[in-house]
Image (cartoon, helix red, strand yellow):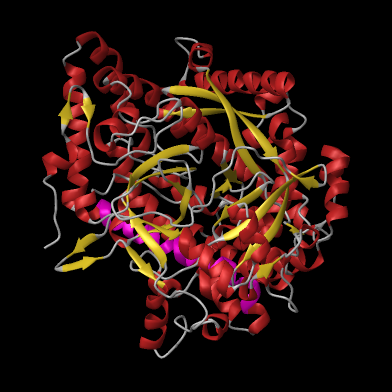
Amino acid sequence: MKKISTLFASVLLLINGSFVRADEGMWTFDNPPLKQWKERYNFEPTKGWLEKLRLASVRLSDGGSASFVSPNGLIVTNQHVANGQLAKMSTKAKDYVKDGFYARTQAEEVKAADIEANVLLSFEDVTAGVQSSAKSGVSDKAAAEQRKAASAEIEKDCVAKTGLKCEVVSFYSGGEYWLYRFKKYTDIRIVFAPEEQTSFFGGDYDNFTYPRYCLDVAFLRAYENGKPAATPDYFKFSETGAGDEEFVVLPGNPGSTARLSTLAQLAYQRDVGNPLQKKSWETRLAANEAYAKLGAEQERQASPNIRSLRNALKRLAGQQEGLLNPRQFGKKEAEEKDLLAGLAKQLELNRQYAPAWGDVTRAYQALPKMADRIAFSTLEYSRIGKIAQQLVRYGNEVQKPNDQRLADYRDNRLESLKLTMLSPATIYPDLEAAILAGWLNEAVKTLGRGDPFVRAALGDVDVGEVVNRAVKETKLYDVAFRRSLVDGGADAITRSTDPMVTLARRVEPVWRELKEWNDTNILSVESSAGEKISKARFAVYGKSIPPDANFNLRIAYGRVKGYEEDTTLVPAWTTFYGLYDRGLSFKETPPYDIPQRFKDKRNSFQLSMPLNFVYTADTIGGTSGAPVVNRSGEFVGINFDSNIQKLSNRYWYVEEEEGGRAVGVHSAGILEALRKVYETQELVAELTAK
């Protein structure tokens, strides 16, 4: 039977003040897990090894990770991470998602529409400066504003001194603040991607399962001044890839975890937050699926949204199942009880910090009654609606002092914002109308006609009429028109009579009112209480526990290893043989139809070559595309998924014995497919330096 660790063993193996939990942790580069590596794997990296790990790693603004794999700006990531850019460059005549893409020469590489790549060059602890800016005796809201102003000033000074992209990042819910300095690339071009049927073989049925048979990989290239970027820090592509039981490291950008949340916060997610998120995603999915049924072209346009939303819903179901499981939720109860017991032994600290848990609990008692309004009072799930909202906020925010603006509208982030606002990617009016109508109809159903957002958006008019006018008559599809509004600033945006802009202007006061409520009653309390809870945790455990993920660079690690599932052994890797077997076993009924290219080349390559593999590293959404590297710093695979056992990983690390595994594409399989199936000899030569 599957091995299930005891509650005590999985939660509280407290030795010398440190948690010891197998391969747990998404660690920051200022606090790498060197002790664990030495004790478990006899691995002691040099400072240079860690520096290369950081400088060769890439964060993509589309929500995924990546890495450099040549000195000429070549980037590897997942096809599903690059999928949005592939869709934006596709047309009815040429579908780069369905058919794939390959540029044999650099001249043929196609510029992506609106993606940015960031590399973390350096970091600095600015905790003292940010925390001390919050004066004692002020309200939580005032303290939050003071910390925000201090962070903005630090960022502004950093940009002036370095010219880099600078961000003050909060860790441990305000327990620490670090200044991150990034090298930014905005000229990113597509080099290679396989057809989606190969990268997503098995479709949603096989998503979050294992064994898998997916070539989920894509290659991009960073350019500077019209030429491939010089990237001396990169991962050499391994011809042999990862072996059984081999120690591996993953530098990636995990999106979001909630492992340090209080019980009150987790209970809210279980009872209100996750069900509401499900309702939101199901609303959007239904609109996209209905539109896709209208024809082949409509299906092509909606397909990226459908794939993303189905993935999100399946992941959410696993997370919610974990929270509803008494045994697993009991882990969090035991953790909080242990922390509070440790704090109680330090009387003065207990007096200072213990009340913070009650502050969070009281704040969250007020959130359910506002949750529906906060969730549905937006236009952002329509691309054209989101652009309109961004323009309206841009006009409002740039008039304010830099330290009083919303974070995305500060001077140091405006260039990144404009990259998306002024994206040349095609936007499809009929799809936008379907999405926005579906969203507003659900808003009316959920909030009622008397709700402030609904009244502002619709007045006395029905949804269809408002959407038809806003979506069909807007000029925002024209990038030059958008640019004219940006260049014209607040005055041009305020005076604009464009129907989508006026819709965004009507609902903006409602959004700001709700944001003000959330900032004052929830986020500000979380910030002040979170700082105290983090200081309590540091006092009891030190920094033996990594902070929650927040889409910044982290280090995960583990080993390549299969697992037991009930009475079945699951192998550490799959091969191309399995791809053909699975397809033929289902008589090639979609989504198990074998791509024509693989049918044609069946006898031309080594079917026993590893394709996918599993490992014990601690990963979550956002680490898609992260490189899997060995002790020598070589690229041995690329992370692309987790198995079903691991879906509750947002709230706790799923133990090795419980079968939780990350899933990757093997480097040897990637090279075999590139050489023999896709015949991308130029790309292979660059990857292997031959």
**From the image, which quarter does the N terminus lie in?**
bottom left
**From the image, which quarter does the C terminus lie in?**
bottom right
Q: Do we see residue 410 in this rendering?
A: no
Q: Residue at x 40, y 26 (%)?
A: 31
Question: Where does the image place residue 146, in percent across and percent down from the top left?
Answer: 56, 18
Total count of labels: 0
Q: Of residues 425 and 630, which is closer to you in this image?
A: 630
Instruction: Name the residue furthest bottom.
Output: 587
From the viewer's perspective, is residue 108 above or below residue 373?
A: below
Q: To which quarter of the image does residue 59 belong?
A: top right
Q: Residue at x 66, y 40 (%)?
A: 231
Magenta region: 299-323
Q: To which quarter of the image does residue 298 belong?
A: bottom right
- Give the side of residue 690 with respect to residue 495, left or right: left
- Give the side of residue 416 with respect to residue 6, left or right: right
Q: Of residues 266 and 334, which is closer to you in this image?
A: 334
Q: Of residues 15 and 604, which is closer to you in this image?
A: 604
Instruction: Name the residue furthest front.
Output: 690
Question: Where does the image place residue 425, in percent across and percent down from the top left?
Answer: 75, 60
Is 675 inside the magenta-drawn segment?
A: no
Q: Residue at x 39, y 32 (%)?
A: 547
Main SS, magenta residues: helix
Is 321 inside the magenta-drawn segment?
A: yes
Q: To which quarter of the image does residue 645 belong?
A: bottom left
From the viewer's perspective, is residue 260 above or below residue 580?
A: above
Q: Do we see residue 639 in this rendering?
A: yes
Question: Where does the image place residue 575, in percent across and percent down from the top left?
Answer: 39, 71
Question: Where does the image place residue 339, in percent across and percent down from the top left?
Answer: 21, 26
